[in-house]
Amino acid sequence: MSGGAKKRFRGAVDRVARPYVAELEASMAQLGGELEATREELAKIRHGLRMISDDEHGNRVRLYELRRDPSYELAFTEEDPLVSFVIATYDSFATLRDVALPSVLGQSYSNLEVIVIGDGSPPETAEVIAEIDDPRVIFFNRPYRGPYPENERERWLMSGSPAYNEGLSRVTGRWIAPMADDDAVRPEHTRTLVDAAQRHRHELCYGRMDVHFEDGRGCELGDFPPRLGGVMPQASIYHAGLGFLHSQPVDSVFGEPNDWSRHRRMLAIGVYMGMVDALVADKYETNQTLEAYMYVQPNSTW
């Protein structure tokens, strides 16, 4: 076929195919619009389900009722009010013994109770508590672990939730201090946070946390207002009247860490929050690199 014939043939094919191509492009554009509309609708449904799960209205009502309760003021007016540390643990009994508990019990602030809840922990955990032999430490071991999702990431997102909630049910202090079994608080952690909370009437008060990695590098976390990765439970205390804000197992379904979910729900209902610009806790990361951590926490300083 000559060059001219080829050109005429292509032109004929183009004239025949052009309407079909245009129709296909229009169909694809319509389908793309429908997919985008479906995504938006699914996002609205997801948001609605999250709101129902959060019970935002009910929790706001509970907060307002708390502020009207005469006992609410005692957290702000008592001198050295009792602070309840809550530690959920599974099998990290060595770090519980060597890191977490010594740091809590060795603080300058002594009016503490430390509620350690075993998440179906092995016998060694009870032995560690017995060795410490401090009447401020209370231990209860749940008869089984979890339950947790089979998916590893979902399991991590809600890790410790059942045990932490059990601990909340046993709190007798004016303030709750969440604590991990493998991290540490600094000697002035509780004194600093209680003083600031009472002075400024913060219902949640937190400071900065130093994160340490095995290679010796680290980063600091702490931002106000709170954001994901900018407020860590180990560096905080909150009014014990807010104990109704449990860790929610459903957080894992929404892909949200249980500790941040609690802070986000506090923000949503109007909990009075404040931050002190002081390092009050240390977090030890043994299975993660600083680069990976900074990818998740992009606003950290290091």
Image (tube, rainbow, N blue to C red):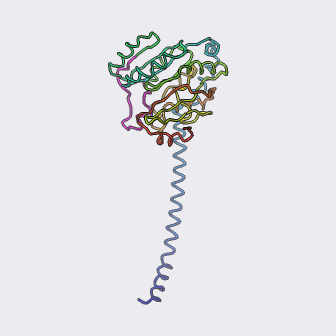
Between 94 and 122, the one lying in front of the other is 94
- Is residue 240 visible in this depiction of the protein? no
In the shown orientation, is residue 76 left or right of residue 247? right
Is residue 243 within the magenta segment?
no
The residue positioned 46% from the left and 42% from the top of the image is 292
Q: Extreme right residue here?
A: 200
Number of marks in picture: 0
Is residue 149 within the magenta segment?
yes
Q: Extreme left residue here?
A: 123
- Is residue 180 visible in this depiction of the protein? yes
Read off the magenta span.
Answer: 140-162
The residue positioned 54% from the left and 34% from the top of the image is 220
Between 120 and 40, the one lying in front of the other is 120
Q: Quadrant of residue 270?
A: top right
- Locate residue 280, reporting x and y percent: 55, 25
Q: Quadrant of the N terminus?
A: bottom left
Q: Quadrant of the C terminus?
A: top right
- Locate residue 279, reporting x and y percent: 57, 27
Q: Extreme top residue here?
A: 135
In the shown orientation, is residue 271 left or right of residue 233? right
- Locate residue 45, reporting x and y percent: 52, 42
Q: Is residue 47 above or below residue 163?
A: below
The residue positioned 37% from the left and 17% from the top of the image is 128
